[in-house]
Image (spheres, rainbow, N blue to C red):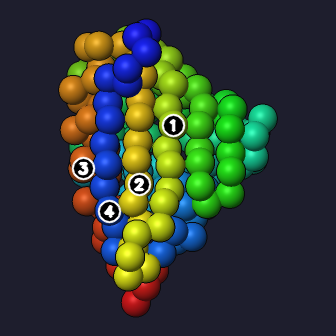
Amino acid sequence: MSDAPQVSIRRVFDAPRHLVYRAFTDPEQLASWWGPEGNSMPLDEIVMDVRTGGFQRWTEVVGGDPTIRTHISIDLTDVTHEEVLEGVMRVTGRLRGGFEPFETRFRITFSDEPDGRTRLEVAQWLPDQVAPPAEQGWREAFAKLDRTLQDALA
């Protein structure tokens, strides 16, 4: 993998930083928005120990074909509460689009913006052939995250 991330996304959410961070670190919150439209995550298959040296594990089920089950295993290498999530993600199982299992490194930062908003920055290093669908997946997931955050604020 090169030094520059294959995926680099900046996004501002209309929610305070603690809620955006919680969306990534609370199993119920994560299950409500993670992945492309139509996918789901069984809550009983989500396990987290969010700290430096900890982990996050879950299964993503593709909508329309529950036989396509992707297993996500993250080893967290740097966690600063409400500021940074960094780690190595291993993606295995039956993958959508015929992709082979792969490993990716990521860094997500959470920063305050004016008016109680949050700037999220995602950098992800992954195999080149996976980058375009990964970026599309983030964008679809962020549309769902917007809805999840608005529900949390309601």
- Left or right of 154 on screen, residue 75: right
Q: CA–CA distance between discs 4 and 1?
A: 16 Å
Answer few, some or many: residues within 10 Å of disc 1's Cα (few below 14, many 20 plus, some between 14 and 19). many
- Left or right of 100 on screen, residue 56: right
How many marks do you count on the picture? Answer: 4
Compared to residue 123, the image places residue 128 above or below, namely above
Q: CA–CA distance between discs 1 and 2?
A: 10 Å
Q: Amino acid at mark 2?
A: Leu
Q: Earlier in the sequence, mark 2 or mark 4?
A: 4
Q: CA–CA distance between discs 2 and 3?
A: 15 Å
Label 3 sits on residue: 140
| Residue depicted at 49% across the width and 32% down the height | 106
Label 2 sits on residue: 120
| Residue depicted at 39% across the width and 60% down the height | 119
Corner quadrant of residue 12? bottom left
Answer few, some or many: residues within 10 Å of disc 4's Cα (few below 14, many 20 plus, some between 14 and 19). some
Compared to residue 148, the image places residue 124 above or below, namely above
Q: CA–CA distance between discs 3 and 1?
A: 19 Å
| Residue depicted at 57% across the width and 64% down the height | 22
Label 4 sits on residue: 12
Q: Earlier in the sequence, mark 2 or mark 3?
A: 2
Q: Amino acid at mark 3?
A: Glu
Label 1 sits on residue: 107
Residue 113 image offset from top left, x and y in percent: 40, 69
Mark 3: secondary structure: helix
Residue 139 image offset from top left, x and y in percent: 25, 47
Q: Amino acid at mark 1?
A: Arg
Q: Earlier in the sequence, mark 3 or mark 1?
A: 1
Q: Amino acid at mark 4?
A: Val
